[in-house]
Structures are given as C-alpha cells and as structure tokens.
Amino acid sequence: MGSGMAANLLKAGYKLTVWNRNAQKCEPFARKGARVADTPADAVRDVDLVMYSLSNDQAVEDIVFGAKGILSGIKEGQIAMDTSTVLPATSLREQEAYAKRGVDFLDTPVFGSKQESADAKLWIMAAGNQAVFEKVKPVLEHLGPTVHYFGKNGNAAAMKLVGNLIVALEMEALAEGLVLAQKAGLDLNTVMEVVKVADFRSPLLVSNGQNILKRDFSPSFVLKLMLKDANLIEKFGNSLQSPIPALRVVEKNLAAAVALGFGTENASALIKALEKEAGVEVKAGSAR
C-alpha cells in the first residue's frame, strides 16, 4: 500500500524520502530520485510531512515509538499522518506523543487494495485538527478520488474499522452464498450474473466472486490481515459495548482458513474453510 502511495507522490512532483524494513523495496524509488533513509528517525529529518503505512498496531509501536523510531527524529512544526488500520486508541496515543513534540498528527486510514493504491484510487479518511487537514488535503488528493474529514483524532481510525466490519461481512456472505449455490447445483456463472445486477450488488462481491470462480486467490488484501482487522474490530466493539455477533462468525472462518494455510492468499480465501466443511470446491463449470 505504501509503495503505491509513494509512487504517486513522486509522480506528482513531491521530493520524497523513503524507508522500509526491507531495504530492497526502496530501490525503485531511489532510481526515481528519492532519498533512502537508514532508519525511521533519519527518514523524518528535514521534511515537512511524514506519512507511514504499517501492517498493525505492533508495527506502529516499533516504527513510531521504538529505538530510532519516528518520535526520536521528528521536530516541532512537522506534520505526521498514519494511514495504517489500527485501533482508535493507538491513533490517540500517537497524537498525544506527537503533541508533546510540537508536531501535528492526523489519522488518515484508507480503503482500497494494493492495485487501487498504485492507481491512485484509494478512498481516504482523515481526523485531527481541521486547519492541518486542509493544509495536507492537496497531498491526499494525489492518492485517491475522495477524502473525507471526520473531526477529532481517532475518528478516522474508527471509521476504518466500521468499514472493514462491513467488508468482512460482505466477504462472508459471498463465501456462504457461493458454497450454498454450489451445493444446490446452480450454474455459478449465472449466479454471478445475478450478483452483478441485483440490488445487493457491490464491486467487492463482483470482483471477488469472479476471482473465486477462477480459483484466483492472488492477494490484493491478504487473509491474515483481514483476521487481524477482525480482531481489532472485536476489541473496538467490546470497548463500546456495541454488539457484533455476525463478526464472530467471520472471525471463526477466517481463523480456520488461516489455520489451513491460506493466510497469505487473498481474503476471499476464507471460502476455503467453508468449502472444506461442505465438501465442495466452488469454481466455474462445476454445477450439477
């Protein structure tokens, strides 16, 4: 995700410094003129805006708060933005730590896949000081077609979890529906034709459904990260005493699919846990 965003910022003409735990991932940007930093602390030196996209809350802990992390190098007057999917409490902890250093912070998580990141088609949310948001909005607009402001820090992180709850339930519904259709002997290509036009259609259902029928589970958003997000949503929901009964069903199936060895495949591979239970394989041309 971060690679796509960085590429689009370079394309837009911004001067870029990059860092990654895997230094090889920085090489394409170095060839295009970006400075490659040795550490997160080095990466934030002499820049106006710091952006990072990390896989989970622990990565934020390591890269932001850890030794030679962002906080050890950032200076008063700079702006930091976290595009990761994390708990709102994590965003608030970041905001507090940055404020002590005179740094403005926005939580700016995004919806979209690696391909949408590369194509500058992310859907972006932002929360924090509105004047700071307006200042950085032109940068964010190079990353996607829409930018939504949610008010105080933590709110954009909360919206990301709300959205990912909906995504997880859609993916579960698709998997259950296709397995049921397979067991019922329906022509799955015709099933997907209905999914494309009926009032319950969505781009997520259509694209993932078509790929499932082709048995294409190449990752745009990996299964194990969806399980991670489901666990975050459960923590967040429990903290607010907000009921999330359907999510627990999805968590069970995600965990089962990861246990079966599909964690690095696309999130749609959660269907494989249901297929095993049903004793079928969902694919085009397999109807009875």
Image (spheres, rainbow, N blue to C red):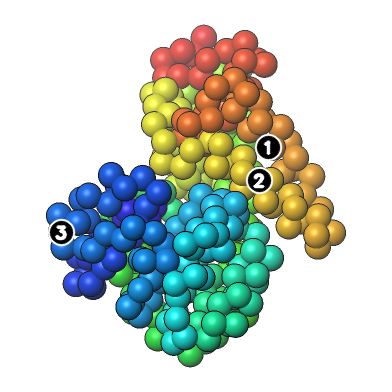
Determine the CA span between mark 1 and mark 2: 8 Å
Q: Amino acid at mark 2?
A: Ala
Q: Which residue is mark 2?
A: 230
Dot 3 crowding, Cα within 10 Å, few <14, some 14–19, many 20+: few
Q: Residue at x 66, y 26 (%)?
A: 256
Q: Which residue is mark 1?
A: 250
- Is residue 218 or residue 16 the one in the foreground? 16
Q: Is residue 98 left or right of residue 117?
A: right
Q: Amino acid at mark 3?
A: Lys
Q: Nearer the viewer, mark 1 or mark 2?
A: 2
Q: Which residue is mark 3?
A: 32
Residue 276: give x, y in percent of width and height: 62, 15
Q: Where 256 sits versus 80, above or below?
A: above
Q: Secondary structure at mark 2?
A: helix
Q: Secondary structure at mark 3?
A: loop
Q: Amino acid at mark 1?
A: Val
